[in-house]
Amino acid sequence: MRVGMIQSNYIPWRGYFDFIDDCDLFVFYDDVQYTHEDWRNRNRIKTGSGPLWLSVPVIHDRTTLIRDARIAYVKPWVAKHSSSIAHAYGKAPHYADYAGEFFALLESRPATISELNVLTCRWLMSQLGITTPVMMSRELDIAGNKYTRPLRMLQQLGASTFLIGPRALSYTDVAAFRAAGMGLEVKRYDYVEYPQSRGPFLGSVTVLDLLFNLGDRARAYLKSTTQNERIV
């Protein structure tokens, strides 16, 4: 069983969903420290004048875990995000097919950024035809640091292979995985361009861009053209 773990992101890019699709089980790794000005609470959309950041205001300090980082609804960010998305994609071929449901998720007012991210991620998975089971890391009562804890979690889950992103390799103890008889694969992110409105192609934006432009054909552009690299 191939298992992957990533911290939840706000309306992630297509590579995040390709990663989930490659897993037999995906774990939202949200019982770790919240990181400021990161993908946890923001992402980009494509506009006529270039990429635009959409950020969810979050209440946190240096000790706050992602799962506990509360959203600040005193700021009208939901209306701002909805308006920005509508302005950027209102004329996209499949905007009307998805926008209403997505905006309803934002308006449901999840308490934490983790709750919002998981809610929208599950919805996006369903639109992309991804059926991978998901769970929260908090469901596994396992201690340890970023070097030791993932392997212990994988062993409890009965995993045979751990899928990681390229950046995670720098803090993954490859020798420990080899000694434990646990497979290790690195995800590769190489994608073809798809039909996109408003100027030159921009790939590093939310997967909403893919859905609004291609609709039920989005799945055909979801997968990396390069195979994952087996390390162990």
Image: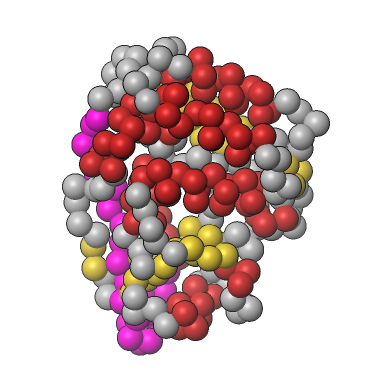
In the image, residue 199 lies at what x, y percent? 31, 14
- Bounds of the magenta segment: 172-194
Q: Is residue 230 left or right of residue 137?
A: left
Residue at 60% x, 59% y is 30
Quadrant the N terminus occupies: bottom left
Left or right side of 170 for 196: left
The residue depicted at 28 percent of the width and 43 percent of the height is 219
Check the image and tell me how it is coloured.
Answer: secondary structure
109 relative to 185, above or below? above
Let me know if residue 94 is in the magenta part: no
- Residue 175 appears at what percent x and percent y? 36, 80
In-front residue for pair 122/34 = 122
Residue 120 shows up from this direction: yes
Pick the residue in front: 190 or 170. 190
Question: How far across and how far down the image is residue 96, in percent?
Answer: 44, 24
Nearest to the observer: residue 109 or residue 26: 109
User: Which residue shows up at 67% across the image and 34% down it?
Assistant: 107
Q: Residue at x 53, y 35 (%)?
A: 101
